[in-house]
Structure formats: C-alpha cells, structure tokens
Amino acid sequence: MKKVLLATLLLLPMFAQAADNFIFCMEGSPSSFNPQIVTDGTSMNSSAQTIFNRLVEFKPGTTEVGPGLAESWTISKDRKTYTFKLRKGVKFHSNELFKPTRDFNANDVVYSFKTQLDPKNPLAVPAASYEYFKAMELDALITDVKKTDDQTVVFELKHPESPFLADLAMDFASILSEEYAQFLVKSGKGLKTLETAPIGTGPFVFKSYQKDSTVKYTANPAYFKGKPKIENLIFVIVADATVRTQKMKSGECHLMAEPQPQDIEALSKNPAIKVLNSAGLNVSYIAFNTEKKPFDNLKVREAISLALNKKSYIDVIYKTSGQAAKNPIPPTMWSYNNKTADQSYDIEKAKKLLAEAGLKDGFETELWTMPVSRPYLPNGKKLGELVQADLAKIGVKVKLVTFDWPTYLEKSKKGDHQMIEFGWTGDNGDPDNFMNVLLGCTAVSAGSNYARWCNKEFDNLLQQAKEDSNVAKRTALYMKAQEIFTKEKPWYPVAHSKQNKVMSAKVQGYKIDPFGHENFENVSLAK
Amino acid sequence: MAIVRGLFKVIGYFLFISLMSFSIIRLIPGDPVLNIIGERGASPERIAEITKNLGLDKPLPIQFLKFSANALVGDFGESTVSKQPVISEFKVLWPATVELAFVALLWSSLVGLALGMLAAVKRNSFWDYGAVSLSTLGFAMPIFWWGLIVIFFFSVKLGIFPVSGRIDVMFDVPYKTGFYFLDTLLSGQWDAFVSACKYVILPAFVLGTVPLALIVRVSRASIIDVAEEDYVRTARSKGLPYKQILFKHIFKNALPQILTSIGLAMGQLLTGAILTETLFSWPGMGRWIIKSIEARDYPVVQAGVFYSMLIIIIVNWVTDESVKIVSPKMRDSQRGG
Amino acid sequence: MAVTATQKLFRNKNVLYGMILFSFFILAFIVSFFWTPFAYNEVFDGMALQAMGGKFILGTDDLGRDLLSRLMVGAQFSLGIGLIVGGIAVVIGAGLGLFAAFYGKRVDQILNQSMNALQAMPSLLLALFVVAILGPSVTNTIISVTLVSIPTMFRLVRSQAQVEMAKEYIQSAKALGASDARIMLRHLLPNCITPILVQSAVCCSEAILNTAALGFLGLGIPAPYPEWGTMLADSKNLMETAPHLMWIPGLCLLLLILSTQLISDGLRDHLS
C-alpha cells in the first residue's frame, strides 16, 4: 500500500500547467489590494498594475505620460487648472458581492481623490494614512477636484508644479469605483473590504488571494483596451531568491521577480529562459554624515572617495547588472550631467588629503550597512566588507554596523550614523524626485537626506527648477546642481543597477517598466 | 477551593502571557511608523498622524489594557502591514504550521518508536549501534544546514520534490478548515491531496529529525530500564512468549517516559518550525512571526507570541496530565522541564 | 589516582571520540589566534568562488576571501561562545539552583517561576528577541544564548540539591552552626557536580547551535566576522555554483556539536 502511494506520488506530473496560465513568481506577499494605501512594489504590482487604471498612464516601457481613463486633458495658462476629458463606456469589474450598475464616470475620479485629500470624507478608509499621496505632497498641492459633467473633471492646484501629470500616473492615483464604496458602506461590509476584494477597471479581474502562497486573476473580457491574451494570471509568492531561481529553471515560473546578480549568467545560458535588461531608475550610495566630524571636512570626504575601488564593487555585487554611478540621478534621466568628473581611484592622493586634513594616521569610524536587499543594492553587507578592506589601506578603521530595517531607518533618520549605505528608486521619473528628496535642505529635517547636507546654492537651484516648466531651463539648473554635488561630495555614489528580467523563452510582448513595475496587459505566451 | 486556586492560576498565566507579548516587541528599538515611511522623508506632523492611525499615540498602560481585554475575546487587532484583522491571517497560517508539525511528529514518533524498540530488543547488535549513532547524529544536526542539504539533493539535483510552498499553484482549495489534507478531500480533489502530500514531505522530514533522535533515545532507554525490572525477569522465567511480554508489560510501563519525550519533542517543533518554515518558504506561523518582527508589526507579533506561549503551556500541561493518567504512580512525582 | 580516573574516563568510547574531535577544534581555535593561511577579511580581487584545492586549500567565498582562514577564525566564535556560555550557565544556573534548593519556600518559588517564565517561549524566539532588543554584537549574542540555556541547568541542579538537602549530613552541618555559604559550597556543590558537568557540555553544544541559528536568521555576529551560521546563510544563494561554501561550514558545525554531545553522553554514562 505504502509503495503504491509512493509510486503515485512520484509518477504524478509535478506541475500541472495549462497553456493560458501565466505564472509570475514574486518576492513577497502584497500587503493590501487597495492601490491608494499600499507603498511597496509587490502590492502595487498586485493591485494598481493588474486591477486598476489611472487618469493618465505611463506608456509601456517609458517614463512618458499618455492617456489612460482620461482621453485628453488641457492645462490652463497659469498652469494651476487641469481639465480631464474622460473615456466613455469603461466598465468596472464585478465580484461575488457587487455588480456595477453604471459605467465609469467623473464621480469615481472625484471620489478617488477626495478620499485621499480629506480623511474625514465618509468614503475614506478609516485610519488609513494614504502614505504615498501625502509623501508626494499632493495634499498640499491640490486645492480642489470638481466634476463639471459626467465626462469632465477639473483639478485646481495651489501653485504650478511640473511633475503633476507624472504624479497622476503613479499607482496611488488609481481610480476606484465610487458605487462600490457606497455599496460597502450601505451593506455594512465596511470600506476595509476594498483591501481584500478590489474592484477596478483594469486588464485583470481579481479572483483569490492566499497569504504567502498565491494571488489569482482572470482576464477582463470587457477591458477597454481589449481583452488581455493571458487568461489566468497567477502570482506565486516565493520569498527566497534561490528558490525562485530554482522554480524558474524547473519551468514553474514564466517570470521571476528580483533575480540575484550572480545567477544571471547561468540563467541566460539556459535555452528555455531569456533574460532582458534595461537601465533602472535608481541609485545606490554611501552618504557621509556631514554634520559629524570628520565628515564635515571636504578633504576627508574626498580622501575616502579616492580610496574606494568602485570597479570591484560593481564586479562583485552587481556583476553585469550594474553601472558605476557618479551623479545622484541615473544616466537615463533627462538633465543627467555627463560632464561631471568620474570618481578616480588613487590611494596615494587619498593619504595626502587625509594628512592635509590633520588625520595622517587615519581615524576610526562606522559604516552602516543595509540589512535588506533592494534592487539598487542587492547585498549591503558585502559592500560594507569591501569598503572596510579598501579603507584599511589608508588607515581608516571602519566598524561595520547594522540593525534590522526599522531600527536602521529610525536611527539614520535621526542622524546617528557616520557613513551609511542607502539608495533610491524613482517614483515618477523627474529629477526633482531624486535630488530634492535626497539632498534638499528640507529633506534634512524630513529625514531622507542621509548626508544631512544642506548647501544653499544647491538647494536654490533645485527650488528654481521645481517651479519652472521649461524643460530646457530646468535641465540647465539640474546640470549645475550636479556639478556642485560632484565638487562637494556629500555622497559616494556607488551604482545604478540594471533591471534584469528573467522569463521563459515563450514570453512575448513583455516590456520592462523603468519604475520596476510588472504589467501583463500586453503579454502573451507562445504555444 | 481547588477551582478557585485553578482560576487564579489561569488568570496569572493570562496576565503573564499578555504582558510578555505586549512588552517584548515594544522593547525592540525601531518604530513601526518609520518602517511604513521607508527610505523617504516625513514631517513630524505626518509621523504623528500615522502613529495616531495605528493607535500607538495612547499611553502604554491604556494600550496594554486594551490589548489584554481584546485578547481575552480573541481579538488581536489589525496588522499594521496588511491592515487585516490578525485573527483572519492567523486562521490561514496556523493550520499550515499544525499540518507540518503533525506530519513531522507522526513520522518521527513512528520511526523513532520502532527504532528504539528494535535497538532495545536487539541490544548491542548492529541495529542497536545504528539506532544510537543515528540518534546522536540527529541531536547534533543543525537543522538549517540539514534542510539546505535536503533541498540540494532532492530538489536541486534530483528534482523529485518541489522546492517550496504548500501545494501546486494550479489547485484551488476552498477554505473550510485550513488544513489542506482535509480541505482537498472535502472538496473531492484527489490530485490536490496528492500534491499537498508531495509538498509537505521535505519540510516535515527535516523538521522531524531532532524529535526522531530524542524519541529513539528515550524509547530505547526506557524499554531497557523496564526490561531489567524483576517482574519482567519473572515473566520471562515463567516462559511467557517474548512478544507478549514486550507489548503487554514492558511497552506499557515504558510508555509514560516515551510520552513525555514526545511532549518535549513538540516543544522543540515550535523552535524548529521557525527555521524550517523560513528555509522552505512554508506559509506558517514561524515565518509570519519572524517577518512581523522585522516589520515591527506590533499586533501580529503580540498575537504570535501570545499563541506560542499558550501552546507551550498547554502542551506541558497535557503532557503532565497524560503521564498521570497512563501511570498513576507518577502522579505525585516531580515536575521537570 | 587522578591518572587512573582519567584513564577510566577515556575508556568510555564516547568520551574518547568526542575528545579527539573536540581537541581538533580547540587546536584550530588556538592556532587561529596566531596564524591563518591568509587574513580572514582579505579580499583577493578576481579570486571569488574558487573551488577547493590550489592556492586556497578550501577555496574562496563570493568576495574572494580564503575559506579556510574564515573557518578557523569562525571557530573562535562558535567554540569561544560555546565555552563562555557553558561557563556562565554553570555559574548562574547552578548557583541559582543551589540557592533555590537551599533556601526553599519563597526563594525557591520565585526562582522556579522565573525559570518557567523563561521557558514559556520557544528558546530560539526568545534568543531572537533578546538580540533584537539589545542589537546584534558578540556580547549580546552571548547574553541571549546564555539566557535560554540557564533554566535547564537550574532545574537539574535544583532537583539534585533538593535530594541532598533532605539527607542527614546537611542537617547535622546546620546544627553544628556552619554558615550558609559553607554548606552550599562545601557540601551541596560537590554532590551536584555530576549533573553540572554533564549539563555544562550540553549547554555548550546548545549555545553553539543557537548562535549559528541566530546567524542563519540574520541576527548573528555582525560582518565581517566569519560566524559559521552566517556563512551558511550566505551559502544558500550559491548552492549550485559553489556547493563547498554550504558543505564545509555546516560540516564543521555538525562535528563540533557532535563532539560536545559525545562528551556529555560519555560523562553521563561514566559518572552515573
């Protein structure tokens, strides 16, 4: 009997797969399916990108904004009023609880923004903080959202803001159904249901979610851009990168999230697998805490920068999927300054500079290493170990310090560190979203300027650039800012990592999203 | 009187468990609010607003009273990460851990008992040395390494068993009890049942290793102990068939100790589950707690600690009681860890 | 006399094999302070993931550091922590156990209940919390690992001492007016030495295991120190490209734990 059972176990095909199933192996569980509330990539892929649409959307594979639920828009002369013309005949999904009685219209747009603007709105999710909306400071920017007729919505802004359209293309600006929210309140199910049973207009309809296991979707036959080619979309949650690689090889995944740099070479040799890559919108860096001695001294920052061997970091940590960084913004972003000097590697000069700074015998310091793996820095511990070995050569004794992620954030936002590893992935493709968020003077008190570096000249350039709308003018300002950055060295920029996308050779129509999102609208599988 | 004393004891335990689960996560530096904010910045007002939304702005004693009052009725609040009621996540993950632990305990008890008996009966034989060496090795085995090796051979090299997960993703198992073994059969999906079996084999094999070592050792030792007692010798000299003596006398008398060892093994399973679940990406309680500590998800960690302490206390109590029932002699003997 | 006792002890095969294995690690441990093939943290450019044999006897890790040197220095942590924790657990656990048994009543109750409290949580979870609260460092690892190993030591010593307390010679010593400390140290302690010896070896092996488990879960001794559990966690991602990184540290860990367990088993057989 036992033998028979064992035999059945071994003979049964391990992985039953139908041709129209598409399996994406992702790295974590989504925290919620309400795109307005979530802040992490996993949750956005699981909600905004699959189930929902936005007024305007990034064109696939670019940072360019195109029409979404809005067919067209006009911007007033003073650039404070935006008027959107909405698409007709867009249908919301239905689920076991709810069948929509009307098409998408202006009420849904007003509802989607009013709830985020005003937490007291009766349809706002109780105790929700709408983190992303507020992190982008839209609550301070938008003064009103009005419906003029069913197909027209008007946004009023407090002041002109160049990245506003791009902000509306971001995931938290997804459009939810007002009718569904009202139904949930009336039926007593509560608005929390939005987080477990989402209703959107997007290419896929949410079917089921099992924590730490799977999320399942089916194609939306009534999708306004046409029914997607994938019939069943399945997200399998595999937290461990090694295991994901394994599953990719055994054909259990059609696409995997966050492959490890060291596996890329072997995977690309596999005939059943293809690897695509593109530049990512990110940067990793080591910030010097300029409020602390000796890092307040530019000579020390220069000396350390000269003693670090960037090439070895790229070779060991990023392998082929990284590009050495010299500016705070990635080279694919407009206004990237190609003329700033490359960081050279010169130990003798570094020693000389240290001596000039009065630290001939070196000094002792700490480097905080990232405890979590991020696409911009896959292994912070390793970077730390390499930096430690490099700096020992100029007599700087580095103690590596790490905490788990929440502690790391708490202490570094207070400025307890000396040198620290960090990185950033862009939200909307605007340089302001890198330089101002990470190096602006207000970011010191907000906690995201980990160099705690406030340079008036640099900051003025950023403020001018933010309010201007002329791209050429803005470019010139940001170019100038990068020169100051290169001269002052508040950071040691490490790398811009490429996004590697590992997928089955059968996958067609996949485009890499510069923001790192996954979108399966146009993807199909060859037979 | 005994009832009142018992009641006081239960209240004492409850207060202790809830105080521990409430305070231990709060002692760890790192703020759940900043974890939500991540790499970006936030003004003090924003931080205050999020803190208020999470209910962390109230004074600690109030928070504690609220927590323990709610815990009493099984309400642990909402996860700060998923914003879902902790209890609803628990309902899904808890059966996964129980299922894994059950299979691990089942195979290790059966194999452990058999090996222990074999070793005791055939003392100083090949079987005895084999069983004893196996048990010594099992005790010394760092199970996270053992798990790596098992994955390396069975999944990576041979490809016989899946690397991680609970069931093939193609199956839709409707939630009834949360136990896949039951739910698959209840919904009549035989293939899904087989798949669930396949997925549980490797992690249960790894998780059962240390309990196996313990059970082999204890059952062998206690059977040898009993076998040397006078009445067994007498029975043997009377010429009773050995099999009959073994099962009727020796085994019955060795049972309390063996049961205690299985109880002890259950305590170890909880620790083991943390490592095994992490290693095999098994969607259970152990991994859930570890991940929630990392995210400072206070409500989840509170619930996780609360339940695991409750389980340990209950398991200890049940082990003690069942020993008392099996062996009245031990009723007044000392309680030991 | 002493010689014959030792000889007798080594006639026990478990102790013999255990000691041989253990002294091998002790040797590596001592040598590592004076000499390793290379510096454990020296990064050799372009030499990452070398296989075994050649210039680097056991190969290199993913950064290009010599594995043998790292293993040897790793012994300082695994073995060192094991020995220290074993020692501290003896002093605190046994001390408290004697105290509880000697004074009985309230003292006993309070101590016993606090030990119960320590054991009410899975030990690894407790160790994890303690390290998380104090922050990862060598000292804090030792503290957390010691904390979880005290209760078993306490219990064993306490129950043994309780048996002794009931005996006549203690009562007569009391009647003769011997001080509390004298009775505990001169009379109780020597009679509890067997369980203490056996259990300290057990504590040592548990400490090694727990340290490695913490390292494996990413809360171990901070980089760049080569702790075996952390090395194993790192090797997981390189299982296929460089399996030696998985095999060797794990094997060291297994053998070291095995040696301490053989010793404690042997001691138990020999002394009882």
Image (cartoon, coloured by chain):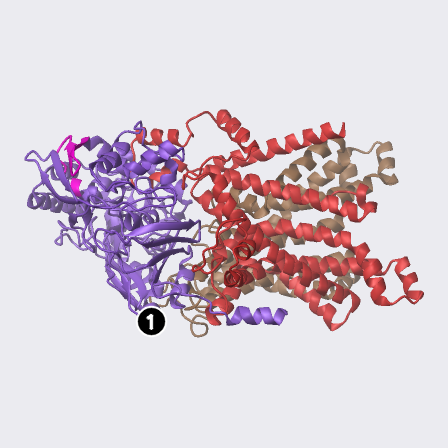
Chain colours: A purple, B red, C brown
Residue A199, given in percent of the width and then of the height, sits at: 32, 44
Asked which quadrant contains residue B104, the reply is bottom right
Crowding at label 1, few (<14), some or many (≥20) Cα neighbours within 10 Å?
some
- Position of C88 with respect to A188 (left or right) is right
Q: Is residue A215 above or below residue A183?
A: below
Horizontal side of A301 relative to A15 (left or right) equals: left
- Residue bearing the label numbered 1: A272
Above or below residue B114? Residue A521 is above
Relative horizontal placement of residue A511, taking residue B300 as reference (left or right):
left
Q: Secondary structure at mark 1?
A: loop
Most distant residue in the front direction:
A101
Reply yes or no: does residue A154 show up in magenta.
yes
Along the line of sight, the residue nearer the viewer: A265 or A72? A72
Q: Quadrant of residue A196?
A: top left
Q: Residue at x 74, y 68 (%)?
A: B128
Q: Residue at x 45, y 72 (%)?
A: C52
Q: Farthest bottom residue?
A: C54
Q: Please provide percent x and percent y for residue A294.
A: 29, 41
B101 is within the stretch colored magenta: no
Which amino acid type is shown beneath numbered disc 1?
Ala
Please indicate whether residue B66 sits to the left or right of residue C98 in the image.
Answer: left
Q: Is residue A228 above or below residue A134?
A: below
Q: Quadrant of residue C107?
A: top right
- Residue A443 in the image: state x and y as whole percent: 25, 36
* In front of the other: A67 or C253: A67
Q: Is residue A397 visible?
A: yes
Mark yes or no: residue C134 visible. no
Residue at the limit of the structure toward the right, as seen here? B238
Position of the N terminus of chain B by quadrant = top right
Report the span colored magenta.
A144-165
* Quadrant that contains the C terminus of chain B: top right
Q: Residue at x 60, y 71 (%)?
A: A4
